[in-house]
Image (cartoon, rainbow, N blue to C red):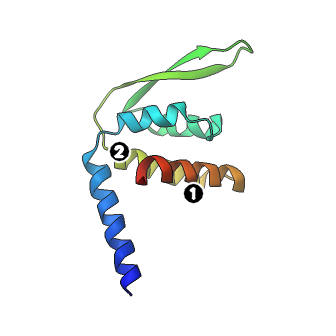
Amino acid sequence: MDSIVATIDGLKGTYRKLNQEDGHPYFELILAEQMIAQKYKQAVFEQMATYEQVQYEEDEEGRFQPVGSKQRKEYSAYLLWYVMTGIATHRVKSAYARYSMQKVIGEKFVA
């Protein structure tokens, strides 16, 4: 029972921390992350379009790659965590890609 209480207290602490922090620095970390497949990053960018404007550059193969972002509205890190968790849970079909995305979420948001 004590471990359940400790887990719940840890989650409450993470929620409070993320809800008080600005989400843009976290968005920049996700933008630069190599472990997340580009199509899932794009899904995050689409969900966050109200809050962030992603800038792209064309690479040597003619594909557009995200290179930066500009914050349109303020938002908490918790909102970005919520969006990413939803995408990792419901839109990522590959078990490996889901694991990679969840690992990044754990490292960037909970650490």
Q: Give the residue pinned by disc 1.
A: 89
Depth check: give the residue in front, 23 or 13.
13
Q: Secondary structure at mark 1?
A: helix
Depth check: give the residue in front, 106 or 44.
106
- Between disc 2 and disc 1, whose residue precedes? 2
Query: Residue placed at 63% from the left, 49% from the top?
Result: 100
Type of amino acid at the residue the image marks with label 1: Thr
Q: Give the residue pinned by disc 2.
A: 77
Query: Residue placed at 69% from the left, 19% from the top?
Result: 63
Looking at the image, residue 64 lies above or below residue 35: above
Tell me if label 2 and label 1 are in contact, CB under 8 Å: no
Query: Residue placed at 35% from the left, 73% from the top?
Result: 8
How packed is label 1: few (under 14 Cα within 10 Å), some, or many (20 or more)?
some
Looking at the image, residue 73 lies above or below residue 103: above
Q: Secondary structure at mark 2?
A: helix
Quadrant where the N terminus lies?
bottom left
Looking at the image, residue 11 lies above or below residue 102: below
Seen in the image, is 18 located left or right of residue 39? left
Query: Could you tell me if residue 98 is visible in this image?
Result: yes
Type of amino acid at the residue the image marks with label 2: Ala
Looking at the image, residue 24 lies above or below residue 99: above
Q: Position of residue 27 (x, y in %)?
A: 43, 35
Checking the image for residue 34, the label placed there is: none
**Numbered disc in front, either 2 or 1:** 2
Query: Residue placed at 57% from the left, 34% from the top?
Result: 42
How packed is label 2: few (under 14 Cα within 10 Å), some, or many (20 or more)?
many
